[in-house]
Amino acid sequence: MPGGEPGALGFGEVDMALKAASRRGLRDPRESGCAGMAVDADPTDLETVWAALGWHPDPGQLQQLLALQTELRQWNSRVNLTRLVEGADFWVAQVFDSLWPLRSLLAAPGLADGGDLEMIDVGTGGGFPGLAVAIALPNAQLTLIDSVGRKVEAVRAMVASLGLQGRVRLRCERIERSGREPALRGRFDWALARAVASAPVVAEYLVPLLRPHGHALLYRGQWTEDDQQALLPALALLRARIERLERRDLPAGRGVRHALVLQPSGPCPNDYPRAVGIPARQPLGQAPAGS
C-alpha cells in the first residue's frame, strides 16, 4: 500500500495545525466559512494517515471533513451519535476506517462509463461510513439508512450543513423493508455496513440491494475461519460469493480491521431479506435455536 505502515500518530495542538496548514498552502478553516471550527489534529500527522490510505483529500474535502467533525461535536451534545469525535478517534477510527477498504474507488472514482456510483450505507448511526465516503467520492450518490429516527434527523441536518444534500439521501426504516422496496432492491453498486450484526445477518441485509455486478462491503473487527464457515451457507442461499478478504492494522495502534467484500453469483431469491427481526433471530444457514 502506498506510504507503507505508519507508526503511532501524535495529534497536536490547534496552533501547530494551523501553522502546518499555512505552510502547505491550506486556508485556515476559520477563514473558509467554518467559523468557530476547532482543528485538533496536526496536518503533519494527517499526512501520515493519508499516506497510509494512498489518497489525499483536496482542500475542499479537508474542509468538509473538519466541518463534519464540528457537526458531530455539536450534535453529540443533543443526540448520542458516537464517542469517536476527537483526534485519532475521529481521523483514524472514523475517517480512515471508513475509507481504507475503498482504496480502489479513491484512486478511480466513478464508473467505467463515467456514471455516478450508487452506494448505500446500512445502519449508518452517526453517519459513518456514509458521510466520509460521500466527501471522499464526489461522483457517488449515497443512501443512508437507520431505524433510529433521532439519529437520522441529526445526520440529515449534518448533510445539509455540509452541502451534501444533492448527493446524500436519508431513510428512516428497518433494512429488511428496504431490501424489498422496488426503488432500492437491485439498485446499488456498493452496499456498506459497519458494526451492524453478525456476517450472515449483514449479508442478508446487503446482497438483495446489489446490482448484478455490485459489491457488498462488510466492515469487521476480528475475522476467523469459524466466521467464514458460518457465512458460507448463508451466501449459498443468497447466491453470493466472497470476492476478497483484507486485513488491516489501523494507524495509531487503533487495532485490527477486516474488510469482507461479497459479490452476487446470481439473482438474489425473492425470499430475502426475510421479515423484520427474523434475520437477526434466525441467521441464514444456522440451525434454529433449540433444534
Image (cartoon, rainbow, N blue to C red):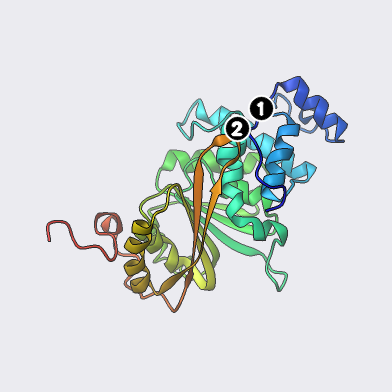
Judged from the image, the secondary structure of the residue bearing numbered disc 1 is loop
Write the residue at 65% across / 44% down. 5
Tell me whether circle 2 and circle 1 mark residues in contact (CB < 8 Å).
yes
Question: Toward which corner of the image does residue 287 lie, by quadrant?
Answer: bottom left
Up/down of 201 relative to 26, above or below? below
Judged from the image, the secondary structure of the residue bearing numbered disc 2 is helix
Mark 1: few, some, or many residues within 10 Å (few <14, many ≥20)?
A: many
Q: Is residue 171 visible?
A: no
Write the residue at 74% across / 47% down. 56
User: Residue at label 1?
Assistant: 11
Give percent across and percent down for residue 246: 53, 57
* Quarter of the picture holding the C terminus: bottom left
In the image, 138 versus 153, the foreground residue is 138
In the image, 89 versus 161, the foreground residue is 89
Left or right side of 65 for 241: left
Residue closest to the far left = 290
Q: Which mark is residue 79?
A: none
In the image, 187 versus 46, the foreground residue is 46
* Amino acid type, residue under disc 1 in the picture: Phe
Up/down of 256 relative to 215, above or below? above
Give percent across and percent down for residue 36: 70, 24
Q: Is residue 277 visible?
A: yes
Mark 2–mark 1 distance (CA, rounded to whole Å): 7 Å
Give percent across and percent down for residue 169: 56, 53
Question: Toward which corner of the image does residue 232 lie, by quadrant?
Answer: bottom left
* Amino acid type, residue under disc 2 in the picture: Ala
User: Residue at label 2?
Assistant: 88
Write the residue at 67% across / 48% down. 53
